[in-house]
Amino acid sequence: MSLLHDLKIRILQALAQFAPGATGVRVALHRWRGVRIGQRVLIGGQTGIIGHVEIGDDTAIGAQSGISKNISGGAWWASPAVPLAEAKQQMAWVRRLGKFFARVKEIEKKLGLS
């Protein structure tokens, strides 16, 4: 690839990441740089999308997500992007880690392991 082509892609990617209008300008900028985007796609702000991936019809991508593979339909969020239900489950697990570690410490103390 030529230096000019690479520069064009980088500029379009930067503009798309911060462009207003999730269904208009942002989608057009990503399409210009080689991302295949289906119909009725919503891309949240500050979303990073690597080149030459395909985003299927009826897909919603949450803000600040990272798209590194082909995705199709439904709501996606996080970095790397996962289906929204899975992302919510992962967040719930992380929030419970403090209590989990406290329980493990308590059990270790009762067993004389710590």
Image (cartoon, rainbow, N blue to C red):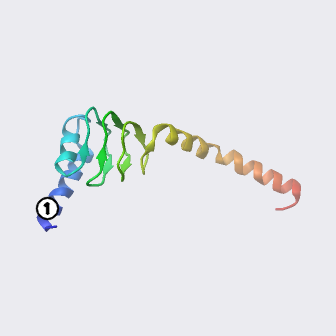
As drawn, 23 above or below 48:
above
As drawn, 56 above or below 66:
above
- Identify the secondary structure beneath mark 1: helix
Residue 80, position as x, y percentages in the image: 42, 51
Is 60 displayed left or right of 16 in the figure?
A: right
Q: Residue furthest left?
A: 4
Quarter containing the C terminus? bottom right
Residue 74, position as x, y percentages in the image: 40, 35
Residue nearest the viewer, comparing 21 with 37: 37
As drawn, 112 above or below 80:
below
Quadrant location of residue 109?
Answer: bottom right
The 10 Å Cα crowd at callout 1, few under 14, some 14 to 19, many 20 or more, is few
Quarter containing the N terminus? bottom left
Residue drawn at (30%, 36%), measured in percent from left and top? Answer: 57
Quadrant location of residue 42?
Answer: top left
Residue drawn at (16%, 48%), measured in percent from left and top? Answer: 32
Residue drawn at (32%, 46%), measured in percent from left and top? Answer: 47
Q: Residue furthest bottom?
A: 2
Residue nearest the viewer, comparing 94 with 55: 55
Residue drawn at (46%, 38%), measured in percent from left and top? Answer: 84
Residue 25, position as x, y percentages in the image: 19, 39
Q: How many marks?
A: 1
Residue 88, position as x, y percentages in the image: 52, 39
Residue nearest the viewer, comparing 51 with 14: 51
Is 4 displayed left or right of 61 in the figure?
A: left
Amino acid type of the residue tagged 1 in the rendering = His
Residue nearest the viewer, comparing 29 with 111: 29
Is 30 displayed left or right of 82 in the figure?
A: left
**Pointer 1 residue:** 5
Is 112 displayed left or right of 10 in the figure?
A: right
